[in-house]
Structure formats: structure tokens, C-alpha cells
Amino acid sequence: MASRFYNPPTTCQVPNLSGKWEALFGKRHDGIFVEVGAYDGESYSNTSCLADVGWGGLYIEPVPEFAEKCRQRHAANHKVTVIEMAASDVAGEADLHIGDTLTTLSEAQVADYNQIGWAKGLHQGQSRKVATERLDVILGKAAIEPGFDLLVVDVEGLEVQVFAGFTIERWRPKVVLVELEDEHPDFRDNERVRAGAIGVRQKLEQAGYKIYYRDIINSVYVDGLVYKDLPAEHMTISPRVTVGVPTHNGQRTIARALESLAAQTFRDFRVVISENASTDHTASYIQNSASKFQDIQVIRQKNILTAGENFKAVLAQCSTEYFVWLADDDWWEPRFLEACVALLDSDAAGVTAFTDFRVYYHFIDRYSDRMGYVASASHDPRLNILTRTVNMAPCAIYGVHRSHAIKAAIARLPDAFDFHDVAVTIEMAAKGQMLLSKQDLFRAGIVDEARLQRRSLDGNQIRYAPFARFLASVTRRTFGWKSAALLLPELLFQLYKVKRHNDKAHGQPSELNQASLRTRADVEAGFQPFPGASAGAGPVPGLLDVIRSAADESGVDVNTVHLYNPATRDAWVADRAASVEAGLRVLDVGAGTAPYKHLFAHCAYETHDFAQYDGYKGPEGTYTEIDYVSDITAIPVPDNSYDVILCTEVLEHVPRPVEALAEMARIVKPGGRLFLSAPLGSGLHQEPYHFYGGYTDHWYRKFLDEFGCEVEAIEPNHGWFAHLAQECARFSWTFERHKHLHGDHGAALSELMGSTLARYFYALDRKAFMREFTVGFHVTARKRLP
């Protein structure tokens, strides 16, 4: 395909507009356009691409702030004029209802917008008086010549009045693009909108104009006297997004899925549907919907495929920059594609973009509370992989992906297994960042109650072993054996928690409290659909908007907050290990599963533990091979045996910690070092072997000095604000235990505590460090020489 001559903005709602303009106007630098309802001259614009190649034009925009932005956008083109005026059927003054991109003179249109979820919230009752004039008069004063090339009318419900003040037989623009929404799902049953659109279409057709292009938002008409034969549209460049729709026996839900796709504000996409040998009327629903899309390919499978093969069938047809699956029981709010594509366009490190979502129960027409998808947008792929394992949300696979990345991920996972969709997201997270728009735009459909069962792909009990093997494989491939050995235990522990949760449910359906579910009106009441809207879960007070914005602007990743305690300790041990000379003797006291063994591979590393704790001990379920099994106060080795003693997160589990410290000082050599860590404040864990809440820096200094050691460094593991962030995160970690207490606000509270406040407080730790409430200290000490 040829490169574009005209380059519309990414928000342009007419697919392949560049190809349409090239077919109708050729590659020209000298055309003339008029746009009524210009907004800022760029967002959603159908003419900015013409001005950019030298066309002259007239922008008509009544809102002074928008008009000024339009002037700035086109300041380099002296042939572009911006007039602050509203085109209507009479001259005078009128109330303009301000609603960002949906600003309108029509009070009835505002009332309709306030009943529609994606538009609700834009109009807050603000209005102002503006001058109005007939379009005939405006064009005359601007010295526009009859027969100009293009008229664009985008006036949010005032199209009838604009055309009433416009003598089309006099001006005869060669092409007219007008926003008429009589086929839009949210307006097609609205008699006012339908009657107005029909009137405009009749006026154009009676004047000899022919329809050239039409979708549910925009219509393009051409002057039949100029274009006796309709020119073929130029396919100047591939669409940016392929939407793959795999379906099998989806007659109950696919019409809604395709309708939501047709209503997207982002229009630069093609559709590929794989109809998987359905035995119901799915094919008829697809045929009825096909006319809504300019670029659609329907593959009719003769033999039934597995679900995974059907998903791959649509992906195989993708040759665009981005790809997204739309399952036949899911659907999107109108700005879903726009929000996701904007994220990927703005961040080259992103491989996937998704939004907040709700579960939609088709069988009762109800919604869940808003659910906050957790992004994995760290620059450290280890944190990204851990995030996807901790937050095993399979719906992340239905985000918008960079095509090369999702194809590579699928190629590495040829065989299906339980949690396969989560595995795909982990493969993606290993290669880049999975970004999040905090807009509530995705609907994960549940067709019937049978889908609530916790079952394997084949209907039997869930199998966890294949997913565990995958976790081992992906960490090894991505990081190598040494780093994988450090990360894998945590990943498998998270899987263990999922298994434990499912085992407790005994395969029974997830509890569905219908009384707590939402109607469409409830959902729309909490919408924040427009660019720059609050990221909150529904309406929130202004203070929370400020906090949420500060958290977002801080750049703190939520996974950094959730993991900073062990991650900081791991980094400290790695640094200490690197300072130990090769060949020195190291004893890991209270080693347990020996998570740091690989860091001391260059040393003579040995282990000690009392080996009596029978709780969770990592993926192996058992202790590592322990060299010395004994009480920590009586380790059976001679005095002055080791060059280094390592003891991390052990002392809180020891009944006599002062004696334990004395024992470690006894067996380390003069001049040898001790690397010690323990919490300052912690919750109960590894019970019944948890005896102390933690240890202060003063405790270390006092007793190490008594036992002949000098403290070289005591480093606090962050400060009070980070500790506070950790406890906010704990609200989410423990949510299943208390969610019944929060009524209808559980999901919103979990997001507020576990993400927004956690990130906000963590960011403050950098600016206002308070060591007295650190989570613990990392201590380096050296035994004095005789």
C-alpha cells in the first residue's frame, strides 16, 4: 500500500480518511475547506490533515478557548482562518451548553447525552451566551467562493439548524461530511435525532448529492454534478488495529459485541471474524452486522476448532500494528479502543494496554462493581512477571497488544493448559510493560451461571502443574537459572495461594450475590469516559481526585509498593554477597530454603536451621539440605569458624534472640562480618514460631558491642510513608477476609487502598523520610580483632 499523502490525527473517527480524501481530491495543496464545529482544530478533526499540506480553510468555533487552541494548531498556515461564532438558522444570541467535545446549542441533545453512559458527566450545567449567524452570512463575510471543496458539519445535534441557514444550491461544496447519528445504537430509537438526520439527508439528496460513505457516526456526500462516477477509495495504508472476533454458537451475545465495536470512537481498524462451525444462528447475526464495518473479513470454519485454535485463526490474519481480541460474549464502551491505542502510542515500552473493567452477567443483565486491572509497567521485568502472577486476571489478554509481541507470546505457548490466558500475559510482561487506562471501558461477559464453575478446560478439576512448569520455563528463559531461582519460589507461592483458595471452594460456583450487582443506570452514574477524566471508581470527592492524580504523576508502580520490603532486602543481600571474596566460608543461619545460596556460589557456603517448621517453605515444600540442624543458640561448630555469617528474617522467630546473637558472634572469625536483618514491626507469620515483633537499631548496637563486634552500617528499609503504603496494600492482600463488611463499595475500596493510597504514600517516602517507623534494619557488623 502507498504511503499517506494526508495524515489525519489518530482520533479521527472516519476509517481510512486519507484514502477517501485522496480519491475525492487527489494529492492537492490548494483546496478550500469549511469546518463548522471545529473544536481545537486537531482532536477528531477531518480537516487538519488538509491544512497541513497547504489547504486554505475556515474554522467556525463558538467557544473562545477552543477557538484559540485551533488558531495555535494552525498558526503556521496563513490560509487558515478561525471565527468565533456558532452557525445556526438565525442571527442573534443563544445559550451554548459546554461539554468538552460534546458542546452544543441543543438543550435536547444535552438531555439525551445525560442519559448515555459514555457521554454522561461531560455536561455539568455550564453554559454561556454566544453569537449565532446563518452559515450563508458567515461564508459570505469570509469571502468563501461557491464550489469550494469540502464542508464539514459536526455540531452535536444542531445539524438541522445549520443546514436551514445554508443555501446548498448556491454554495455547492464538492463534498459534504456531516455527523448524523440516526444509526448509532444510542440514538437510533430517538425520534428527534432520526427525524433531524432524515431531513438533512433529504436536503442533500434533493440538491443532487450522492452518498459516498456512511457509518453509524459520519456520512460523506458528494456533488453528483462533479462526481458522476464515484471514485474508488484509495487504500493508502493498512488500518492500525486488527480486531479479531472468534465465535462459536454465540447467537445470544455476538450482536452486542459487534454493536459495541461499531460504536467505537477510534475508527482505524479492520475486523476479522472466525465463525467456528456454529450450529445456531451466529452466522446470520454476523451477516446482519457486516455492513457496519468498512473493512471486514469473515472466515467460516468447515470443521470445528478448539477455542485456542479459533483465537489463533483470527490472530493469523493480523498484519496491522496493533491487535485485540473481542470475545463474542464481551463488549466495549465506545472509547475502549481510543484509550488503549493512545496509551501504546504514548509509550514505546508498552506491549499491551487495558482499562478498568466490570463483569457483565448476560443472563440477568447486571454488572459487577468496577474492577481495577493492575498494570505491570515497571522497567524491571521481574516485577512485571510477579504482578501478572499475583493478579491472575485473565481478561488482560483482551487488551490491545502490539501485534509482534502477542504473536511471539502465542508462538511460545503452542499447547493449551489451565491458566493459559494468564501465561500469555506473563509472556507479554516479560517483554515489555502492560499499561493501564483508569477508565471503566471493558465488559467481561458471563453468558450463564455454568460459567461461574471453577473447572479445568476439559471440565474436570483444575490442573496446576502445567502452569507451574510454565513459570519455571519463562523465568529461566528470561533471566537465567540464578535469577530464576530467586524469583520462582515467590511465583509458585502465589500459585499455591490460588490453589488453596480454589480447594476451599471445592469446585463450587463462585458466589453471586445478585442484590449487590449493578444496573446500567448505576454504571452510567459512575462514568468518567472522557480524556483527562478522574481515574476513580465512580464519582469521588475532589480530595481523592487530587491524591489519585498525585499518585499517577509520581510514576510509582503499584508492584514496587507491594514488593519493596523483600525486594530491598534481596538487593541488599546481593550487594553484601558481592563484597565477599571468593573462597571464604559463609554460614547461612536459619537458612530454611536457602534463597540466597546462588549469591554465594563463589564461596564455601553452608547452612544451618532448626528444621522444625512445617508450614509453607517454597516450591519444594521442604527445607534445603541443611548442614547443621540445631538450636540457634548452640550451633555445633568451633569458635571462629566462619568468615561471614548471614542471618536474614530469623531473629523474630527465636525465643532467646540475645543468646542467638552471642552464638553467631562466637563462631565468626575475628575480622569476619555478620549480615543481619529482621523486622522492626511485622504481623504474625510462621506461627507458632513467632516470638517478637522486631528489633531496633539500638538493640543491634548494644548487644553486638557486648559480644565484641562493631557495627559498620545500619540501613533502614525505607521509612514511615513506605510502611504506611505497605499497610494500605495489605487491605487488598487480605480483602477476601473482610470484603463482606464493605457492602457495595468493596472493589472501589480495594483499588483506593491497594493502589491509589499505596502509591501516593510510597512516593512521599522519598520526600519525607521518617526512619522511626521503618519496616526493619539491614545490619553489617564486623568482629573485633584480638
Image (cartoon, rainbow, N blue to C red):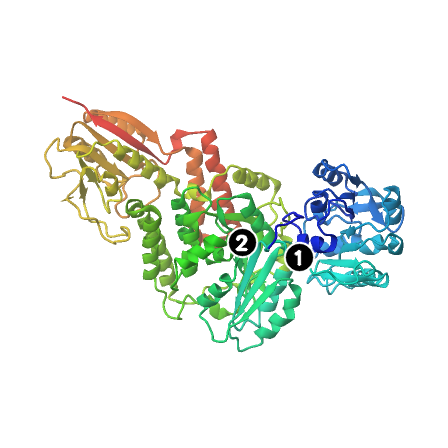
Left or right: where 293 falls relative to 199: left
The number of callouts visible is 2
Residue 273 at least partly seen? yes
Q: Nearer the viewer, residue 339 or 637?
A: 339
From the viewer's perspective, is residue 184 above or below residue 575? below
Where is residue 296 shown, x and y percent of the image?
60, 64
In the picture as drawn, the residue positioned furthest to the left comes out as 638
Q: Nearer the viewer, residue 272 or 566?
A: 272
Left or right: where 774 falls relative to 155: left
Where is residue 302 shown, x and y percent of the image?
50, 76
Question: Residue at position x 45%, y 35% from top?
Answer: 721
The answer to which image quadrant residue 92 occupies is top right
Mark carried by residue 603: none
Residue tagged by mark 1?
Answer: 234
Q: CA distance from mark 2 to mark 1?
A: 21 Å
Using a 10 Å C-alpha cutoff, classify the residue at mark 1 as few (fewer than 14 neighbours), some (14 to 19) or many (20 or more): some
In the picture as drawn, the residue positioned furthest to the top comes out as 786
Mark carried by residue 322: 2
From the viewer's perspective, is residue 701 above or below residue 284? above
Left or right: where 88 falls relative to 465: right
Where is residue 767 shown, x and y percent of the image?
47, 29
- The mark lying in front, picked from 2 and 1, is 1
Q: Are marks 2 and 1 in contact (CB under 8 Å)?
A: no
Q: Amino acid at mark 1?
A: His
Q: Earlier in the sequence, mark 2 or mark 1?
A: 1
